[in-house]
Image (spheres, coloured by chain):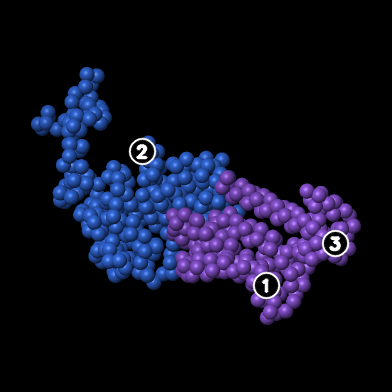
Amino acid sequence: MAIEFRNVTKTYPDGTVAVDNFSLHVPSHTCTVLLGSSGCGKSTLLRMVNRMVDPTSGAVLIDDDDVATTEPVALRRRIGYVMQDSGLLPHRRVVDNIATVPRLNGASKAEAHRRANELMEIVGLDAAMARRYPRQLSGGQQQRVGVARGLAGDPNILLMDEPFGAVDPLVRVELQRELQRIQTELRKTIIFVTHDIDEALTLGDQIVVLKKGGEVAQIGKPQEIVEAPANDFVAQFLGLDSARRSLNAAPRDGGGWLVSDGRGRPLGVVDTVPDQHTDTD
Amino acid sequence: MNHLIEAFEVLLDPDAWSGPGGFGARMIEHLWYTALALLISAAIALPVGLIVGHTGRWRALAVISSGMVRALPTLGVITLAALFVGIGLTAPMISFVVLAVPSILAGAYAGVESVSPATKDAAKAQGMSGWQVLLRVEIPLGLPLIIGGLRNATLQVVATATLAAYVGAGGLGRQLFLGLRTQDYPLMLAASIAVILLAIILDALFELSQRLLRRRMGLV
């Protein structure tokens, strides 16, 4: 399911312009990352898709249907939504949290629980967690439950609002890897909001770098953005102009190369470097 | 001190408990008044409080009006009501409802408001309608405070229900006013102790139910 933002603007009653004349095409079965600092309107844009926010002007279309013509409750039940701090219902067990949308869609309790157990396996949660309450889980586990809940209604679209923002870096990398694995299997249309450039480069098929007011600084594949930042803002946001992304490689004693950034901070090791200059045939 | 000992003697005397005017019958009457007043008050205050909490509208009105109602002296309300509806249970019942409504109302809207906005937002984003958010998220999560409001109201009403006898109805107030008029202080004291015991027992039941509830909801 493709999503289209068509000249959307959101102005709040106090005059704040959260998003100003924003347009974007989100292709089916891909992950589009909205990347920007806080206050750039990225969450507002995300929430327009499931009508948690209605644009002041312009339209959001899913497969050419204006979402404004769809009843919000019905719309939300067929769009997965994963948020920061999981947003789980504290008084319901994990299995019931995941079963929320199937239950709302009229599935029997047994059916919904079966679906929930299926999803726990998909997101890598131990079956023993099913009977626990959210507060008995670690932050990373809670986010997995959040992802499982988002997927439980088998939506074509998954909206993710900084879902891994509140977990520690190690767990975050693990969750990102899991999401990639899930995505290669399920191929949802994902819109993913983050302010973490590394997360965007990891997950995005398409990255939209946003300035304040939802102004697009650049749209492109991760590679395009790193190789050819469209302007100073993007370069700065990526840290391209800082020493962070200008890399040096030095030969190691044991063979291979040690890679460090412009400040000399070691980043990793390269075993072989593709040599382009030795052969001249 | 003698009065107190005599009062306990009255309470331990089986004869004082039996018969249509005995402590047993009066206590059941007393409980019945309390339950009825709470039922009527809850029927009024719970829906209003839940809607105020859910929508956030008319909140100032609810706070101000329940504050004003709280300031009314119960004896005054009973007397005033009795002037219009006469002797019997109606006048005291009106005043008990006036007494109980503010507590229940406050508990209801505070309970709904206590639920974290992020949780409500998440529930809505999953596709719950307004009613579903109220019934499945706000009420269950706000229940400890909602019950807290009922608990306060119960204590106030069970203590005040003695005033029913002031305008000719029953309850433990009968013994109390009888003792007062006949200067039978042990009897008066015995009635007071019975009311205090009732209040303590009811309060303990509420405490127990709140604890069970928290445990059941995994909130402990």
Residue under the image location 42 percent in, 48 percent down: A85
Q: Which mark is residue B78?
A: 1
Task: Quickly name the residue at label 2.
Answer: A169
Q: CA distance from mark 1 to mark 3?
A: 25 Å
In the rendered image, the quadrant that contains the N terminus of chain A is: bottom left
What is the x, y in percent for residue A177?
Answer: 37, 41
- Say if residue A201 shows up in the picture: no
* Amino acid on which disc 3 is placed: Gly
Residue B207 drawn above or below residue A177: below
Given the image, what chain letter belongs to the residue carrying mark 1? B
Kindly indicate which chain is depicted in purple in the rendered structure.
B
Q: Dot 2 falls on which chain?
A: A
Instruction: Respond whether the residues carrying marks 2 and 3 are from the same subunit.
Output: no
Of the residues shown, which amino acid type is indicated by label 1? Ile
Query: Neighbour class for label 1 at 10 Å: few (<14), some, many (≥20)?
Result: many
Q: Amino acid at mark 2?
A: Pro
Numbered disc in front, either 1 or 2: 1
Q: Mark 3 belongs to which subunit?
A: B
Residue position marked by numbered label 3 in the rendering: B22
- Mark 1 or 3 closer to N-term? 3
